[in-house]
Amino acid sequence: MTQKERIARFERLGLGLFVHFGVFSVPESGEWYQAASKESAAEYARHLEHFFPKKDWAEDIAAFAAHNGFRYAVLTTRHHDGFSLYDTHGLSDFDATHLREPRDLVREFVEACRAHGLVPFFYHTLIDWREEPRFDRFSDYLAYLRSGVRLLCTEYGEIGGFWFDGQWKYRDRDWELDALYGMLRQHQPDAMIVNNSGLNDLGAKTHPELDAVTFERADMTGFDCEKAAGRWSAEMCQSLNSHWGYARNDISYRSVGELLDSLCLCRARHGNFLLNIGPEPDGSIREIDHALIGLLGQWVRTNAEALYDALPFPGSVQEGAFALRRGNTLYVFFSNVPMEIDPNAGRFAANRAVFRFPMDVRSAVWLDNGEEAALQRDAEGVSLRPAPFRYGTSLLTRVARCELQESAE
Ligand code: GLC
């Protein structure tokens, strides 16, 4: 598979579920709990005694993700606390084989993903709070790190990609990335390589070997997908609230509308949206996460044909609208359009947005109800406005499937 094919395959996945799960889930205060609480490594290690993922945690998450239109899932196989959800084959005594009942949570995840048609991806930390005291012998640490990643490359079959994180903390160190990425290419030649460039360097391509740049908690409006086309992609990761790992008292939830806007912004730039859940200590999906993603999923299922395989149509981003193209079909998205209620007509009107087609169009249909979308023709050409919604409905973002004239180019 060429790099171009690898990237095209990734972009067709479109929507990914990020899963932050590990020992940090036990204190229920987010994945940075250890750093925030200043617990020593020994104190922190005691949380392992209370880490009991339920038998079907991975199965439940994979079924939930697939049902809601996610096509890949990224699991924290090791986060900054240094705990490995995989069997490290003795490299570390802080891994899933040291649970009260030895497990390999990464294997459970991979098998569940495959059973539900999701592509498994692995998040792996680069910084490691347990190992930091020996960072003066950095090369030794990097050898340890690579040994863990090598197991992930060789023990679990074909993996969709590797998602590294934490380099931003020691930007100036030599991370021997040629060796790390070289090993990945050797064992998993078709895997995507991603390395989170962090909050202060959004969208930066920090190494030639990277297949996608990251926009952590930030929209990718600045991503030039035409320049990057076929050479690198982009992914925005976002959490439902302000933590990635489970934080019981965090109620700062995003709305379904905001999540949908993020998804659409990513697709308008041909990037992927990676949406995070932090399961509870036993691996259950929190009720509100279930509900929010369930509503998002309803929209995703309805509009699926426009979401994965269509490419941005160059120059089509307009006020409140953009278009993606697949063959002779153009999908026009009206996103984040302010709705005004017309109580007399019992309708929501959204008269401000309009999409002007740069070519002729034969017919148009709304994906959410199958009704014809009324094309307007005037001296300036063909245009489309978001049709009013029936009162009692608010769809936030509507997509019209428009068939182009055969000759349209
Ligand atoms: C940041 C955080 C980390 C989280 C990641 C997800 O890098 O340090 O906790 O896993 O973002 O993008």
Image (cartoon, rainbow, N blue to C red):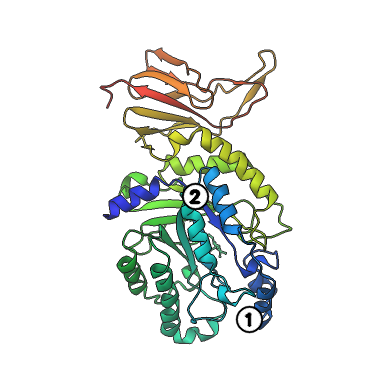
Task: Using the rendered image of the protein, determine whether residue 83 is visible from the camera's viewpoint.
Answer: no
SS at mark 1 in the image: helix
Q: Is residue 319 above or below residue 215?
A: above
Q: Amino acid at mark 2?
A: His
Q: Quadrant of the C terminus?
A: top left
x, y percentage for residue 66?
52, 46
Horizontal side, residue 250 vs residue 156: left or right: right
Q: Residue at x 48, y 41 (%)?
A: 265
The circle on residue 116 is 2
x, y percentage for residue 249?
74, 58
Q: Residue furthest right?
A: 249
Horizontal side, residue 135 vs residue 37: left or right: left
Q: Quadrant of the N terminus?
A: bottom left
Query: Distance between the Cα atoms at labels 2 and 1?
Result: 37 Å
Task: Using the rendered image of the protein, determine whether residue 183 is visible from the camera's viewpoint.
Answer: yes
Q: Nearer the viewer, residue 290 or 360?
A: 290
The reply to whether callout 2 and callout 1 are in contact (CB within 8 Å) is no
Q: Quadrant of residue 190?
A: bottom left
Query: Mark 1 = which residue?
Result: 41
